[in-house]
Amino acid sequence: MFIQKKAKYLVFVSIVFFATVLSGTFRIAEASDVVGVVDVLKAFRKTDLGKSIQSHLKEFQKKKAESIQSERQELQGEQKRIEQQVGVISKDALKAKELAFQQKVQDYRKKLQKIQTEVASENAVEIRKFLDALSKATIYVGKKYGFQVVLAQHPIRIPMGPQPPAFSSSRILYLNSKADLTESVIQYINKNNPPGSAQ
């Protein structure tokens, strides 16, 4: 009788032990699923869509550069010819050539800036296609596996022309509305910092 009771007790303890271990495992798994991470740059480099976009942008930039390369070479040649004419032709004639050359240089710079803007615009359009696809994929995967937040690791950054700042992909790719604590934080601040407390 005593042995049977002891055996039942050991079985009960074992069940409780394994239940505790398993429940702890599940809690850890749930906790680890709160935040996910996507390496955006790696996805851009590895996906077929990303590879296609990279190839297109490389070819687009190459064609734009070739379209103005001959004009740059012509300007370099003209500059050498003007330098060789110093002391050979009159000062007035040399000055006229230099003024005409400076105008050509300004025109070239305008064309170059236009090309840089076109390249930057094409970059933005194509990268946006990838980011839209990335967003859809991340939302699907985030919901499927129960993540609350998915963050971007190594977000894509591309220059947007000579002057504007770089374009950067979002750091948060997916956010479950339940994970947004903004309203609770606002309520807490209002409750604990009544009007006039900052003075």
Image (cartoon, rainbow, N blue to C red):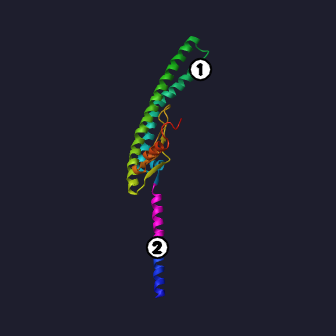
Q: Secondary structure at mark 2?
A: helix
> Which residue type does callout 2 highlight?
Val
Residue beneath disc 2: 16
How far from the left and from the top, in percent, is residue 40? 46, 48
Residue 32 covered by magenta stretch: yes
> Which residue type does callout 1 highlight?
Gln
Residue positioned most to the bottom: 1
**Which label sits on residue 116?**
none
Residue sitting at x 56%, y 21%: 81
Disc 2 and disc 1: Cα gap in Å? 96 Å
- Position of residue 184 relative to residue 108, above or below, is below
- Position of residue 24 relative to residue 46, above or below, is below
How far from the left and from the top, in percent, is residue 129? 39, 43
Q: Residues within 10 Å of mark 2 (few under 14, many from 20)?
A: few
- Do tag 2 and tag 1 residues touch (Cβ < 8 Å)? no
How far from the left and from the top, in percent, is residue 9? 47, 80
SS majority, magenta: helix
Which sits in the foreground, 7 or 38? 7
Residue sitting at x 38%, y 56%: 144
Residue beneath disc 1: 84
Q: Residues within 10 Å of mark 1 (few under 14, many from 20)?
A: few
Residue 141 occupies quadrant: bottom left
Q: Is residue 90 visible?
A: no
Residue 31 covered by magenta stretch: yes
How far from the left and from the top, in percent, is residue 72? 50, 28
Which sits in the foreground, 154 or 36? 36
Question: Which residue range is magenta in the image?
Answer: 17-34
* 123 on left or right of 198: left
| The C terminus sits in image quarter | top right
